[in-house]
Image: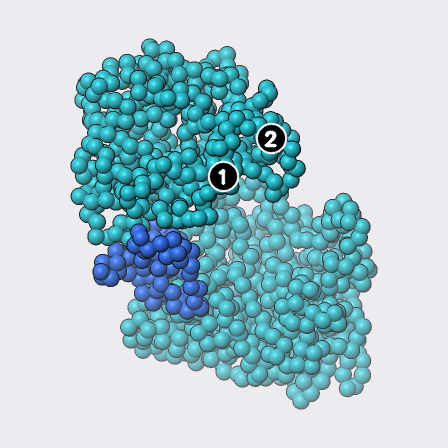
Chain colours: A blue, B cyan
Amino acid sequence: MRIDCPNCGSRDRREFQYLGAAVLMDRPAPDAGEQAFVEYVYFRENPAGAHRELWLHEMGCRSWIVAERNMGTHEFASTRLAADVKRGAK
Amino acid sequence: MSRLTSGGQIDRTQPLRFSFDGKSLAGFKGDTLASALLANDIRLVGRSFKYHRPRGILSAGSEEPNALMQLGQGDQTTPNVRATTQELYDGLIAASQNRFPSLAFDLLSVNDLMAPFFGAGFYYKTFMWPKSFWEKVYEPFIRRAAGLGRLSGKADRALYDKAFAHCDLLVIGGGPAGLMAALTAARGGLDVILADEDFAFGGRLNSETVEIAGQPGAGWAAQVVTELAGMANVRLMPRTTVTGAYDGGTYAALQRVSHHLADPADHLPLETFWRIAARRTILAGGAIERPIAFANNDRPGVMMASAVRSYANRFAVLPGQKISLFTNNDDGHRTALDLLRLGADIAAVVDTRGDVAAMGDYPLITGGQVTGTSGRLGLKSITVSSASGRLKVATDCLAVSGGWNPSVHLTCHMNGRPVWREDIAAFVPADNAIPGMRVAGAANGDFSTHAALSAGAAAAAEALGDLGKPAPATVFPAAEDAPIQLEPFWHFTGSKGRAWLDLQNDVTTKDVALAHRENFRSVEHMKRYTTLGMATDQGKTSNVGGLAVMADLTQRSIPETGTTTFRPPYSPVALGALGAHGAGKDFAPSRFLPSDALARELGAHFIEMGVWYRPSLFPQSGETHWRQTCDREMRMVRSAVGITDITPFGKIDVQGADAAVLLDLVYANTMSSLKQGRVRYGVMLREDGMALDDGTCARLGEDHFVLTTTAGAASDVFAHLEFCTQVLRPELDVQFFSVTDQWAQFSIAGPRSRELVSGLCDEDISNERIPYMACAEVTIGGIGCRLFRISFSGEQSYEIAIPARYGEALARELGQRAAALGGGWYGLEALNALRIEKGYLTHAEMTGQYTADALGIGGMVSAKKDCIGKVLSQRSALVGPGKMELIGLKPVSPLKQFSGGAFLFSQGARQVLGNEEGHVTSHCYSPSLDHVIAMAFLRDGRSRLGEHIIMKDNARGIEAVCEVCPMVHVDPDGERLRG
Ligand SMILES: [Zn+2]
């Protein structure tokens, strides 16, 4: 598998570390309550298709990356720096 | 001798000597081991897996199921080498496998007589009872009887390598389709890799008599290879098998670098395992001829027709004196013509088809079937049935052609299901089975040379188009375009003898019938029940035949019965190649302390902690047991001064206007209130509420902090900070960097530590200026250093950080000054025991399964601010009674040692799983107390101080009554720390 790092270009998957769904970007407010945090930490969709997820280019530029990957085919539709995505969301 | 006096692609000017089962033999450069054996009239080359049946060479390629050899001798032998792909070299030593005592006389061929007991599923039925027989009788018997080559049991001293390659276009297979594709793409300007498992490019062109552009096919291939070799944008990789197709255009390939060399240079690896990243791929892997099943079709001398043509045309060897053919298509006839041209004697051509005519001067039996064979160690005759009755034909070689199966293997590696093509009665690759891959030539069912050449050129033109380049104007060479003429015929059902499908795993048509009778009818079940296709050849010559037999039995068509599927690797890959640079010292990097050389001079004992080599003990003369050393070092720290190198602790330098904001988010306690020049102990949580790591946080300036982490968690904590700053809070103005390697750091601990450090620093470091939990920048010998007043031993203690290049010099200075004060170096054993005496945590306690509260530091979680993990650390399930709490343990009666991981039970409770109430985490002998102590998790432990409980270690047979006590055993009020 190869992943396009926005900084480094197409690199072998072994350079990256997978974290999980990109919902981890949206940490609940401190007063959102226990249930909100339980859902944030534990509850995940498992779609047989498009999935937004976080990867760390661990053995490269060490950027956290938001990737859109098809869970059925492993095809990547897009990769963006998580920091850019987060800043854009604000 | 079966070697022809002329012709072929062997180099008769380079004779080679080799040995087989101790017998010295001769061959030529350009031979494979198989062709050289046949040239020496050796037909019996091995014994079969289960029945120990005599076996000969079946094929001339990597699909070979029979001719597996043990190569080399002594402790550096390689088992299961296919003689059909092994290049001959001078001095090659080969031995046959799976025979005892010899190939011609094998005692275990008695298995063949017991065949009725060894049918499909025999493992599941025969060896069921009695249970005790399995280990002592059945398993040793099966292991002795079954199997392939043997390992030496010694370490493999061979060198293996791994490498990455990148290209625009990977062409897999160097036959007519692959060569044409590579040539077209290379002329069009693409970076091309052409890989072929053979040592000579050309594929079937090397084995056939077809002409391309008016010249012999092999000559045309050589001409193309010469042109490709001269192009800078082409990498030719002969002896390279592409073994797997993976996501994103990544392919695995095994290159046999020096298997063919008599005397390889020392630096050459045996094999290199490649990962090839290709933007586009053309699979031109050809096709594999398939056998026909009939009674006793496994005798030495029964071969594939294509293999007979390979041996005759390429290697100039006639595999028999009187050769017969059994075919359901025109290839059988072409074989006869080739053989006649070379002067061979054709005994008969048996064609299952009724309406065919002979293409030349040979006896033809139409509408005929080979129904049996004779010859114990080699074929002597075949029995032929036809409309005109039964006939016995004397022959020593039967060439069989049942049609061709395209090599769809790689197209299955990403779940592609091959599709059935009725006109060629074979599976072909599904469309777009591998993204970016096109299939051309025989691998796609295009069997004629013309079709292969044009498909190769077309696929390359499409790849060029994909990558934005025009296809070059290529002069297209003329070649034969004979249509396929085939009438499916899979197996002869009329006779009683066993008809083999899978020669390597000894699976016959009867085994498939048995699977059918016992209702293992799905292809996947049939495969596993009979083991058909599950040997090292993955059923390259047997899978479709097995399907056909099951289709007949279930009265369905072959595509209705199922498809064949294949998984990586295409052919076996040695673990040594997969693990290249992953064994021994290459397994992980080695990191050495700044004081490493000094510690070695002092005779320290070392242990590996993660990737660091750290001294565990500094034994002095006369100390014979590790405990003597450890106890002395502990007393030294508690009574004078001890030095230890703590460089491996993670150090993270954090700077920026929002540095304090970040630290308040990641630490459970508040860091923004920390004053400059002060240090605070901190704990980080994961978002699920469990403790991630603990360490210190020093504030060097308003916007400048230095964190320490435990050595093992350094990279996790760093990645956690990156997550927080990039994913959660990218707006924060903060930067950080790991400076673990930039600063050498030493701990100086003990009542005389200040005496030592003040003599070293240019500045005043009195208790007033540098009190407990203070930090300052100091100079030592003119070098800027950082001084921290922190402790991991409970003693008055300093940590000095110095730029790493001065680390060794400072270490030597510290050691000398400590010695003058009655102190010295101490190792990890003492360090660990000192912290247990004080109840300090390590990752023996902070396993990721416990909250700060369970660890006894719940009070650090600030009520006034948010932090990562705060909300979930207070989940109802994690607070309240019944939770694990960390406590201390001491023995009630004399105890030699506690046991890490031992369970704790209430007195009187049944000591069974489920009743345990906790477990021991860390333990040591305390010289200060003169008895052993431990740390342990215990249910509601903090409210059970003084209670007696049972420690039980069933694995080591230790049981003791202990008292629950506070974790801090030494200096509970911390007076020594502050003094
Ligand atoms: Zn990167």
In the visual, does B546 lie left or right of B923?
A: right
Using the image, determine if residue B730 lies above or below residue B425: above
Q: Secondary structure at mark 1?
A: strand
- Picture quarter with the N terminus of chain B: bottom right
Q: Amino acid at mark 1?
A: Met
- Picture quarter with the C terminus of chain B: top left
Q: Quadrant of residue B336?
A: bottom right
Q: Amino acid at mark 2?
A: Ile
Q: Position of residue B644 (x, y in %)?
A: 37, 23
Mark 2 or mark 1, which is nearer the start of the sequence?
1
The tag on residue A70 is none
Question: Residue placed at 22% from the left, 58% from the top?
Answer: A87
Question: Residue placed at 33% from the left, 10% from the top?
Answer: B820
Q: Position of residue A54 (x, y in %)?
A: 35, 57
Q: Is mark 1 within 8 Å of ligand 1?
A: no
Q: Secondary structure at mark 2?
A: strand
Residue tagged by mark 2?
B950
In the visual, does B502 lie left or right of B255?
A: right
Using the image, determine if residue B27 lies above or below residue B813: below
Subunit under mark 2: B
